[in-house]
């Protein structure tokens, strides 16, 4: 079985959770919810707007991970999408 991994997914999940935790710690007025569903919706929002980066091997994973961490523009773009997604998700009317 081939093991294919999208390293953008891992990075986005980490960043969304980090940003939710930071905003929650600051008691920001615009953050009305940080439940798992809101976080997952935000992760999905960001992943649908970023280009996937697939790797196959462990070595490829390490190389590609370094590429993300060294690319400050990519990190800034992802963070911008994360905050944008958080705001959109928190402004959406939820049935729960």
Image: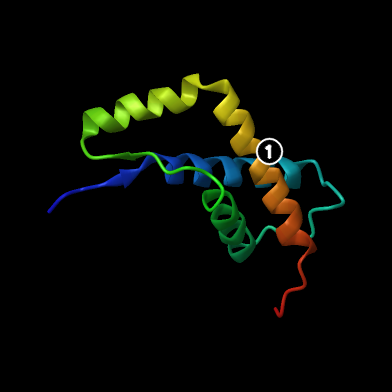
Q: Is residue 62 left or right of residue 83?
A: left
* Crowd tier of the residue under label 1, counting other residues whose Cα lies within 10 Å: few below 14, some 14–19, many 20 or above: few
Which residue is depicted at the point 68% across and 38% down? 80
User: Mark 1 sits on what residue?
Assistant: 80
Which residue is depicted at the point 71% across and 60% down? 89
Q: How is the image coloured?
A: rainbow
- x, y (%) of residue 79? 64, 37
* Residue 32 seen in this snapshot: yes
Which residue is depicted at the point 68% across and 57% down? 34
- x, y (%) of residue 70? 48, 19
| Number of marks present in the image shown | 1
* Residue 33 seen in this snapshot: no
* Residue that protrudes farthest toward the right in the picture: 29
Which residue is depicted at the point 70% across and 40% down? 22
Which residue is nearer to you in this view: 95 or 77? Answer: 77
* Residue that protrudes farthest toward the bottom in the picture: 95
Q: Is residue 90 left or right of residue 46?
A: right
Residue 10 higher or lower than 95, as above or below:
above
Where's the C terminus, which quadrant? bottom right
Residue 93 higher or lower than 33, as above or below:
below
* Residue that protrudes farthest toward the left in the picture: 1
- x, y (%) of residue 38? 64, 62
- x, y (%) of residue 15? 57, 40
Q: Secondary structure at mark 1?
A: helix
Residue 91 higher or lower than 11, as above or below:
below
Where's the N terminus, which quadrant? bottom left
Which residue is nearer to you in this view: 75 or 39? Answer: 75
Residue 52 higher or lower than 32, as above or below:
above
């Amino acid at each position: 079985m081939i093991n294919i991994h999208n390293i953008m997914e891992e990075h986005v999940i980490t960043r969304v959770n980090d940003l939710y935790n930071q905003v929650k710690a600051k008691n920001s007025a615009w953050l009305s919810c940080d439940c798992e569903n809101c976080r997952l919706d935000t992760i999905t929002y960001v992943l649908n707007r970023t280009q996937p980066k697939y790797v196959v091997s462990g070595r490829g994973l390490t190389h590609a991970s370094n590429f993300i961490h060294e690319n400050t523009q990519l990190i800034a773009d992802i963070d911008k999408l994360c905050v944008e997604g958080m705001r959109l998700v928190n402004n959406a009317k939820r049935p729960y």
